[in-house]
Image (cartoon, rainbow, N blue to C red):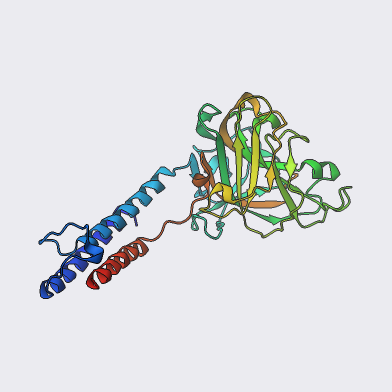
Amino acid sequence: MTPDHAICGILRKHKEFESNVTIINRKTPKKPLTGLHRGVASDPEDPNPVMKRAFLVAVGAYVLAAVSQLHAASVFYDSFNYSSGNQVSSGGTPSWSLRNSPQVDPAITSGSLSYSGLLTASSDNSVLFNGTNPSGIAIRPLGQVYNIGNVSTLYYSLTFKVTSIAAADWGGAGNFLTGSFMMGFSQDTSGALVNPSAAAPLLIRTGDPNNTSGTANDFQSFQLGTGVTAAAPTGRVFDGTRNYNPGDTLFLVLSYSFNSGVSNDVARLYVNPVPGSLEGANTPVVTTSGTVADVSNDQIQAFFLRNNSVEPAATQIDDLRVGTTWADVTPVPEPSATALAGCGLLVLLGCYRLRTRH
């Protein structure tokens, strides 16, 4: 139900309720204005000025909430409601395209992910990364170039689940140190994606963190990280304190902050922040030091999804959002119109009960 429909419902309920109260008041002798009614204008044609005021406040609050939801529009939101079985670059056209032919980018798969408290599209499909296929990149332009001149921080979020880790996914000790970058911002939209052009990439690595010699390839956990860019190895920073398991559904938020000067931009990774909360109420698991080179050309203008053989065998993602504020990428479901109408009526009833006691 739309906000307009909800407001109309509240108005109807108020009109019915006010009619009933007016009938009661016509049978009840008028009392002098005291207590709660002092300072409230008296109108012989309007026996319920307090209720009127409370009602207007309730409706006004709802309108403001509805408008704020409209203003929290992100750069883009994709629930991947495309035909299952197609690659993102073909099923998601024209929004998505294949960056380099004849590569194989991630595919659309049936089913969706959800995360408690987060606004998601439960009936749409999702994306499956295949760590055993040849590499390939799907790219989506953001519609404009972002830099320090028009944004301070750019954010993206998604729901994320590794579904399978195969033996030797990590490819040995060298790849445990650098992992693989699965997605992120890009400073360009075509040609080969070079590591310094990928900003705030989502990094992943498998293998036993207690045995980096390349002999423990059957370790069934993974670690996450990010970097200012995907430049390896100095630009990639992992959270080495937390291991996640196949089947865990995670809510991830990543950000890239532009700063004036050279080699001081900052990337952050949040794992399972609270949807709808303030950014400052959540602690990133990775914050880059701001000592490595900034993204090429100091700009961002696209988002990419990347298959790579160093990734886990299968990873599912859903509900991808890109925005210019934290609120853009951490939305919560809107209250139902019924709940809002109920709250409005409770306010009116409470005011009426107070009025009848004076």
Residue 16, placed above or below residue 184: below
Figure quadrant of residue 48 = bottom left
Residue 12 shows up from this direction: no
Residue 119, placed above or below residue 26: above
Residue 19 drawn at (x, y percent) = 16, 67
Q: Quadrant of the N terminus?
A: bottom left
Q: Residue furthest bottom?
A: 27
Residue 202 drawn at (x, y percent) = 66, 43
Q: Which residue lies at the image location 55% right of the left edge and 28% below the top edge?
A: 148
Residue 13, placed above or below residue 200: below
Q: In the depicted view, which residue is nearer to us: 104 or 278?
A: 278
Figure quadrant of residue 250 = bottom right
Residue 330 in the figure: left or right of residue 102: left
Residue 341 in the figure: left or right of residue 90: left
Residue 99 drawn at (x, y percent) = 61, 33
Residue 146 shows up from this direction: yes
Q: In the depicted view, which residue is nearer to us: 211 or 306?
A: 211
Q: Which residue lies at the image location 27% right of the left edge and 61% below the top edge?
A: 10
Q: Which residue lies at the image location 63% right of the left edge and 48% below the top edge?
A: 270
